[in-house]
Image (spheres, rainbow, N blue to C red):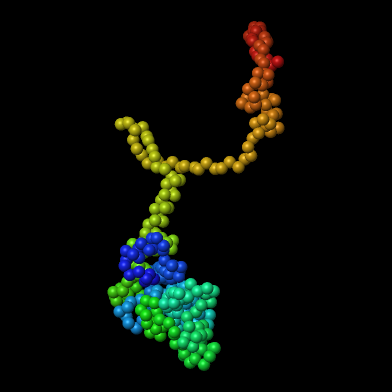
Amino acid sequence: MFFQANNEQTILQCVQQIGPAVGAQQMLKWEFKHAQEAIDSGVYITWVCDDQSKGDCFRIGSQSNCFCGHRFSSHELILKKAQKTNCKDCKCAEFKFMPRRPEEIGQGHLPRRKGFDINVWRPSCKCKHTHEQHTPVKPFKCKACGCGQFVSDFACINCEMKYEDHFTVFELEKERKAAKKAIREDFMPLATSPEIQQEVMKKLKLDGRTAEERFLEEIKRGDQEESKQIVLTLQEDGAGGIAQRPQVQYIIERKQNFAPKQNLAKPEKSIQLMQQRGIAGLGNTTNQTANTVTMKPKTTSVPKAGGFMKSSVPKMQ
């Protein structure tokens, strides 16, 4: 679609070694994005030419440009017998697709010119003024000259037909299916060449999974996260030996200790006091003997029936 080579194997090698050109990369990103929007919404919007046998020329979505100069996202979309797509930002009453890059209309040489600004460039009329210099409503008169209507000076890169020979189509998934047109994953760019498609998506750093695959991956990831917190184990002594039974064991992750490190050579004052008082387990083992309280037995008399009985009771010295 956006490659000059016509041999599939040659194209695959070029994509693997070099990748799509800068302009083609941006176009492909839009195409993938708009295809995904169509799959998610069930509404397929395409730009096609009068010769229906040539298929869809471009996929239309949120990043597509209208003749009025505003994005598709700025247009109201109401699907009825007659589609309503008036613009919220100007007097435009109908979305009319307009290419955003020179590569889309066979002018891929322009970006290579010195001083070319893609942010300023717009497709032009034969009067040499851009589409934005024409009124957004019929008959699309030029505001910069006496031109009575917009007549393109370019052709579509896909079908090589003029801009005026194209129109925008709004279809529901069931309508495309009935017409035997591509839907869902088959609607994605390069779907007929899976190897090239995967390589292009890698180069563009796009997620090539289907909605179902993403959903299943999320479930799997959730299960893995849960298994980090809960472990099913157990062993239980039974009459016939060790028996297995389900038991939940919670694994609590060790929290990081943010307390300041202790200076063992110069402990805190409270620890010094405890060491001086001889509390076991603290301080130097060499000082334990000096801090040990000595005990000396002393004979005392305790009363008993008929007199006194001597008893040895330890007394603190």
- The quarter of the rendered structure image containing the C terminus is top right
Residue at the extreme front of the image, as rendered: 114
Residue displayed at 34% across by 37% down: 244
For residue 302, say whether it is visible: no
Q: In the picture shown, does residue 195 fall above or below 113?
A: above
Residue displayed at 47% across by 90% down: 149
- Name the one closer to the observer, 184 or 254: 184
Q: Quadrant of residue 207?
A: bottom left
Residue displayed at 54% across by 74% down: 115
For residue 224, say whether it is visible: yes
Total numbered labels placed on residues in the image: 0
Q: Is residue 185 left or right of residue 253?
A: left
Image position, residue 264 (x, y; %) = 65, 31
- The quarter of the rendered structure image containing the N terminus is bottom left
Q: In the picture shown, does residue 221 fall above or below 69?
A: above
Residue displayed at 39% across by 56% down: 217
- Name the one closer to the observer, 165 or 43: 165
Image position, residue 107 (x, y; %) = 44, 77
Q: Is residue 219 left or right of residue 142?
A: left
Image position, residue 105 (x, y; %) = 42, 78
Q: In the picture shown, does residue 194 fall above or below 287?
A: below
Q: Quadrant of residue 201?
A: bottom left
- Name the one closer to the observer, 66 or 128: 128
Image position, residue 205 (x, y; %) = 44, 61
